[in-house]
Amino acid sequence: MTNLSTTNQLTGLELQLLDNATALVPYLQKFGAIIDEERHIPDEVIQKVTDAGLFKLGTPKEYGGHDVSIRAMVEIISEVARGNGSVGWVVQIINGNNYTASLSLPPAVTDLIFRQEDEVRFCSVLQARKASVKKVDGGYWVEEGFWGFGSGSKHATHAFLNLMDGESMNKSMGMMLAVVPMSQITIIDDWYTMSLKGSASNSLEMRNVFIPEQFVVTQNLKPMEALPIELQGRDRYRPHVQLITSITTGISAILGLARGAVEYFVERAPHKGITMTVHTSQAAVGHIQYKVGLAAMKVESAHLHISRTIDNLERHVQNAEQFSLKEISQIQTDMTYAAMLCWEAVDLLMAESGGGVIADTNRLSQIFRDIRGGCNHALTTASTGLELYGRVLMGMPPQHMLTLASNFFLK
């Protein structure tokens, strides 16, 4: 269910994966209430997603993955989220993390990990809430570590965890990203929420765990004078990994949820009246027509911002160009603004759906809850993005951690 003619920019394989995702939509919609009630995605649903090849979008081809373009990843995952927000969120997180991990890790480590299992699935948390870590011979000893919001952890094989908390990151201007098998991590069952209930974004805990040095990547956030010109193929995306993370692990599910809301409302409107009025069909009422048009335009405008972001990224990657501070701030703000537009679209439709929409089993109610949670994610919070863009436009330094992290490849 793409629009704005994006399908002509996808390969044959990517179009097939998009069709696979679309075919799953009715199936996923049937599981909406079950997923929320059980607070996780049933194994049979996970298997369906696996069989459709949708957990290998961001996995390198040499390890049996599809290694789709970033544009294709957004479109395919948005279709999954059109079926169910929690499933879309988990598919988004795992694919985005697989892509990020494979770009961040040394090739030898990537090879070792991705050859271990038929289907590697990474969850991640990029800032620890608590981390007591010591450097020891051959690696690092995690005495105690606690990470919040481990989306997809229940279905992951590995975690990609920052061994630093916020204070340590600010002091060192860097991150220590560790690959840890899920067998060494305790999942804390604390995901009791109003939103994205099935994502099981539980907290993760480690105590007295040794991590070999080869599985820890230190990312220095200090400026670099120029991009490495010798990078070829997929490796050309390596310098932009922080920026790619903001695209691949936040906006896709939100876009799909908003598309699903418009579709659901339009399907029901001809057969639904307005209580306490003479109107027997919402579709025939002028102010409803206006709201639907406005909501649809907000979603399509969000897609335009996402498309601009991807176009800008691809142009810089293909030409090995560095970003200006304004350019990179605009890209990150595009994502947060797109999320805000999607939320506003769903909120408009929710307000015109009558009292029955507050039922937990109403699909629009579930979309409303899920998209609100998604838009509160650190990478899609509109106020943070708009503050960033405003600061940069007025000549002030950025306050956004990912902008600071991208500092090393700015002009």
Image (cartoon, helix red, strand yellow):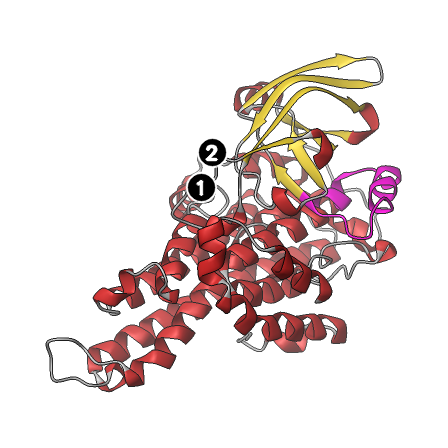
289 within the magenta span: no
User: Which image quadrant: the C terminus?
Assistant: top right
Where residue 383 sits, quadrant-wise, is top left
Q: Which residue is mark 1?
A: 388
Q: Amino acid at mark 2?
A: Gln
- Say left or right for 304 vs 216: left
Q: Which residues are magenta?
A: 100-122
Of residues 227 and 157, the one nearer the viewer is 157
Q: Point out residue 248 in the picture as x, y percentages from the top left corner.
A: 61, 53
Q: Measure how far apart labels 2 and 1 are at the Cα level.
A: 6 Å
Under circle 1, the secondary element is: helix
- Say left or right for 49 vs 363: right
Q: Point out residue 302 in the picture as x, y percentages from the top left corner.
A: 45, 63
In this rendering, the answer to whether 357 lies above or below 379 is below
Within 10 angstroms of label 2, few (less than 14), some, or many (20 or more) residues? some
Please say whether residue 181 is visible from this viewpoint: no
107 within the magenta span: yes
- How many numbered discs, if any? 2
Q: Point out residue 113 in the picture as x, y percentages from the top left corner.
A: 83, 41
Whether pointer 2 and pointer 1 mark residues with C-beta atoms closer than 8 Å, the reply is: yes
Q: Amino acid at mark 1?
A: Leu
Of residues 405 and 318, the one nearer the viewer is 405
Where residue 145 sits, quadrant-wise, is top right
User: Which image quadrant: the N terminus?
Assistant: bottom right
Residue 399's tag is: 2
